[in-house]
Image (cartoon, grey):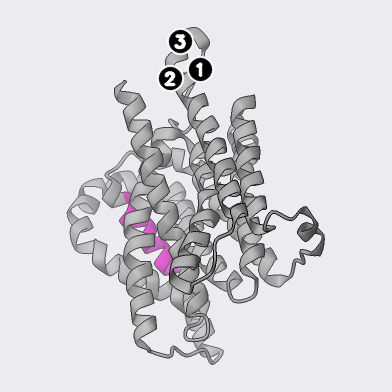
Amino acid sequence: MESGRKHLIAYALLGLVMVLWAGNAIVGRAVRFDIGPLTLAFLRWALATALIMPFALPSLRRDWSAIVKDWKIVLALGVLGVGMFNALLYSGLQHTTATNALLLQAATPAAVVVLDRLVFGTRAGWMHLLGVACSIAGVAVIVFQGDPAAALGLQFARGDLIILSCVMVWSLYTILLRLRPQIAAVSFIAATFLVGLAVMAPVAAWEYAGGARVNWTPGVFGALAYVAVLPSILSYFIFNSATATIGPARAGQVITLMPLFGAFLSAGLLGERLHPYHFAGMVLILVGIALGALTLHRQLHAGPRGGARLEGRG
């Protein structure tokens, strides 16, 4: 029963993360004319690192030998999940429509399942695959506004390819989390933030050299404060912990909630109307996530008799 409660809490916390990340995309889109995408990513991690480091230093000193021992995976996770992902996300939001971005983010659960199979040989059960399909169908209902014919008019451009690359990078980060060193969460977060900051520094300098400047409005200051604290420090702690609890495939599937929350945030912040297809999509998304949770519940109760093993326990 205790493990079931832990998994329920993990799903609930991942839902919170999706709200915060949906807000991150809206903020990145809103300030695109005031700050370059690479500069935004660099300043995000510079501020997040500065905020977390005073609390992380004692833990980093204790865990330093383990970090050095597993430096390759720490470097890979920092480059992928902190550096590349955010640079690609903010860059893509400069060039693509919200509809296309939502559709491409819906590919994350499928990408996680495929990469997990290719890299680690993890087999997804039929119920889990059905859940992924339901969640993706729910997002499609939302982005196509309940009209299948709308898919025929969808066009992909430069920004779409960038967002697709962003999806693949995050999916790889998600499955590789099982290899993270067994160190304190704050040590791991701080180490990967430092890696991401180092990755972003030269590309932000390159953007600056190309003439990009920041228009320091109150909105930009507010955007930086938001993206540095909530989608960064808080969300990365929660996502990494929840992925270790329920496995990468199910954590990836919860990402299908992000387009849904984005629609509600847009309605609340931008005054956009919600329609019946939003609620139809929500039902399909929640059914898909529930199927993923049900497979996890069955695995937990199968135990050694069923030969089941939990994903992401590494």
What amino acid is labelled 2 in the image?
Leu
Please tell me whether mark 2 sits on a helix, a strand or a loop: helix
| Residue 308: mark in rendering | 1
**CA separation in Å, label 1 and label 3:** 7 Å
| Residue 304: mark in rendering | 3
| Residue 300: mark in rendering | 2
Please tell me whether mark 3 sits on a helix, a strand or a loop: helix
Identity of the residue drawn at 49% across and 52% down = 76
First in sequence: mark 2 or mark 1?
2
Position above or below: 68 against 249:
below
Identity of the residue drawn at 32% across and 73% down = 225
Q: Does 190 appear in magenta?
A: yes
Local packing at callout 1 (Cα closer than 10 Å; few below 14, some 14-19, many 20+) is: some
Q: What is the total number of numbered labels drawn onto the structure image?
A: 3
Residue 77 appearing in the image: yes
Left or right: 53 in relation to 139: left
Magenta range is 188-198
Position above or below: 280 against 267:
above
